[in-house]
Image (cartoon, rainbow, N blue to C red):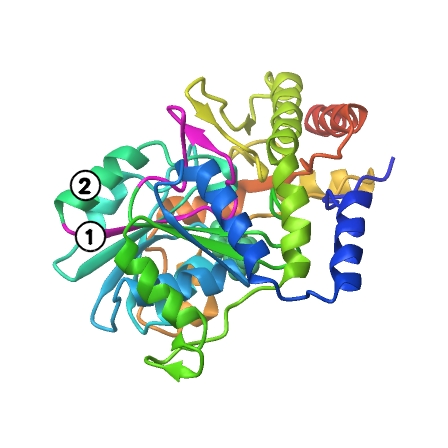
Amino acid sequence: MNIAFFKPSIWEEEIKAVNQVLSSGMIVEWEEVKKLENNFNNYITNWSYHPIAVNSWTAALDVALKALDIWPADEVIVPDFTFIATANAVRFQWAKVIFADVSKSDYNISLEEIKKVITPNTKAIVVVHLFGNPVRDIAQIADFAQKNNLYLIEDVAQAHGAQINWKKVGSFWDASAFSFYATKNMATGEWGMVLFKAKKHYERWKLIYNHGQSQKYLHTTLGHNFRMTNIQAAIWNIQFSKLDKLNNQRIQNAKLYNQILSHQDILQLPTINEDVVHVFHQYALLVKPGSHISRDEIREQLQQKGIPTAIHYPLPIHKQPYYQSLWYEEDICPNSSYLAQNIFSLPIYPGLKKEEVEYIAHNLIDIINS
Ligand SMILES: Cc1ncc(COP(=O)(O)O)c(C=O)c1O
């Protein structure tokens, strides 16, 4: 059997919707985009935030940090184990990225790790709901941020629809940013969205993202072009109508993996808690160090059986060459380095069939026990 690591869930409906936009001549249609922003804001925050769609998560966070007045003298806390964009958005403001370590068991940042790196210069915290798994103590982190006058921004690039205690992630404090890149749980190709709690931040943001334009051809501040088009809006609309169903297919695949692999002592599997909706952007598991077979040997043997895997992420951000060229010492976040060495991801996308999950899991068991 030859299995794909990922296939986008793009079907006839999406293709038809794009064709309709192209033949309508309305390639940029602000009203359509506004409707989508409102629908998503309702889904995540029950209309209690202010949304703006943009052309990527990276653009969303860049302008969000500008709207929140992050300056070069400020420090922003970011988890060390995530995709590099989370940290880079802070560097676009020339502010200092302060890396917090993550948990060895759920791979996410925690209040305890945040407290270890906080200083009088800390202005904001960016939390990442990594792999679709909500940060366990996000409510406590939000409370801590408010009490200490810090901005809290949620990176929800991988966790559309994830919940903790029946509250959706992306609705916990000042701002949240979503990615709708091709591989995400909801995919349009390229697209992002930011949700702001305070209207004043949204108003600043709205100016920046469209050339600093307060009226047609009146530019009151320095702005960018981060607008998006009706073509992505059409795809977005269909993907949004399927989001819960697609997430549910990912969850079912994850449960099946967990069930089949549950007795393999050398593996650490993702946990599925009652009060949490983990939407499994990735199914990341860990090969315990000191086991008779290494992560890399397992991956190689899986590949020989037509089963591709991936490593999210092979280097902690502070060890990336760009960050090493700044002021970071090696190994400031040991848990993050440990994960980079031992973690790997199995295919989990919604179109993956039950028999394919079974094939992958049983082959993994055979490899471990051969
Ligand atoms: C956790 C995380 N943050 C941010 C991003 C950046 O998103 P975009 O590619 O839409 O800019 C990604 C995308 O891979 C991501 O996984």
Report the magenta residues as a range: 149-172
Q: Is residue 234 above or below residue 285?
A: below
The secondary structure that most of the magenta stretch takes on is loop
Q: Does residue 312 appear in this view?
A: yes
Q: Position of residue 214 (x, y in %)?
A: 37, 74
Q: Position of residue 36 (x, y in %)?
A: 55, 49
Residue 156 among magenta residues: yes
Residue occupying image coordinates x 37% and y 82%:
219
Say which label, 2 or 1, has the lower sequence index.
2
Q: Does residue 183 appear in this view?
A: no
* Label 2, label 1: how far apart the Cα atoms are: 8 Å
Looking at the image, residue 17 sits to the left or right of residue 59; the answer is: right
Secondary element at tag 2: helix
* Residue, far right: 1
Q: Give the labeled residue for mark 1.
A: 150
Looking at the image, residue 306 sits to the left or right of residue 84; the answer is: right
Instruction: Choose top left, top right, bottom left or bottom right for residue 296.
Output: top right
Q: Give the labeled residue for mark 2.
A: 144
Give the residue type at disc 1.
Leu
Verify CB contact (< 8 Å) between mark 2 and mark 1: yes
